[in-house]
Amino acid sequence: MAGLELAEVILAVIIGTLAAIVYSLRVLIMLERRVASMESNIEKMTGRVLKEEVRIEKAFSKRKTSVRKAKPKKRR
């Protein structure tokens, strides 16, 4: 009977180890999904910032050219 009890303990340890591995993989998949979601949000925000920068640069360049044209000429 002692041999059977030992086999049961070994089997329980193996099953427990497999369950821990499955749980760890589940947690890793959940974390990977969160990171992927964060990356997509960062990409969206980066795109918005880029659009805003382009819009500001265009407005600034238009303003700069209009200021140059509006300068009065020097009188002698």
Image (cartoon, grey):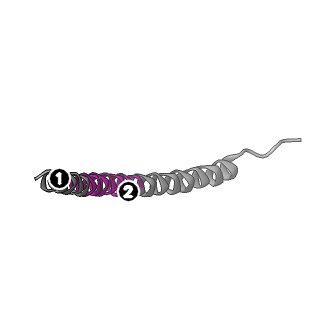
Q: Position of residue 37 (x, y in %)?
A: 32, 55
Q: Residue at x 68, y 53 (%)?
A: 69
Q: Is residue 47 magenta?
A: no
Q: Residue at x 39, y 55 (%)?
A: 39
Residue 12 — which label? 1
Disc 1 residue crowd, few under 14, some 14–19, many 20+, Cα 10 Å: few
Location of residue 8 in the rendering, given as x and y in whole percent from the top left corner: 14, 54
Q: Residue furthest right?
A: 76
Q: Which residue is mark 2?
A: 44
In this picture, residue 13 sits left or right of residue 36: left
Mark 2 surroundings: few (<14), some (14-19) or many (≥20) residues within 10 A: few
Secondary element at image label 1? helix
Mark 1 → mark 2, Cα distance in angstroms: 48 Å
Residue 52: x, y in percent? 46, 52
In the figure, residue 48 lies in which quadrant? bottom left
Along the polypeptide, which appears first: circle 1 or circle 2?
1
Query: Picture coordinates of residue 29 (x, y %)?
Result: 29, 58
Q: Secondary structure at mark 2?
A: helix
**Amino acid type for the residue under numbered disc 1:** Ala
Residue 21, image quadrant: bottom left
Instruction: Give the residues drawn in magenta, as a range.
Output: 19-42
Of tags 1 and 2, the one toward the viewer is 1
Tell me which secondary structure the magenta stretch mostly adopts.
Answer: helix
Left or right: residue 40 compared with residue 7: right
Q: Furthest-front residue in view?
A: 1
* Residue at 15 percent of width and 50 percent of height: 2
Q: Is 27 on the left or on the right of 52, as rendered?
A: left
The quarter of the image holding the C terminus is top right
Q: Residue at x 13, y 56 (%)?
A: 4
In front of the other: 43 or 9:
9
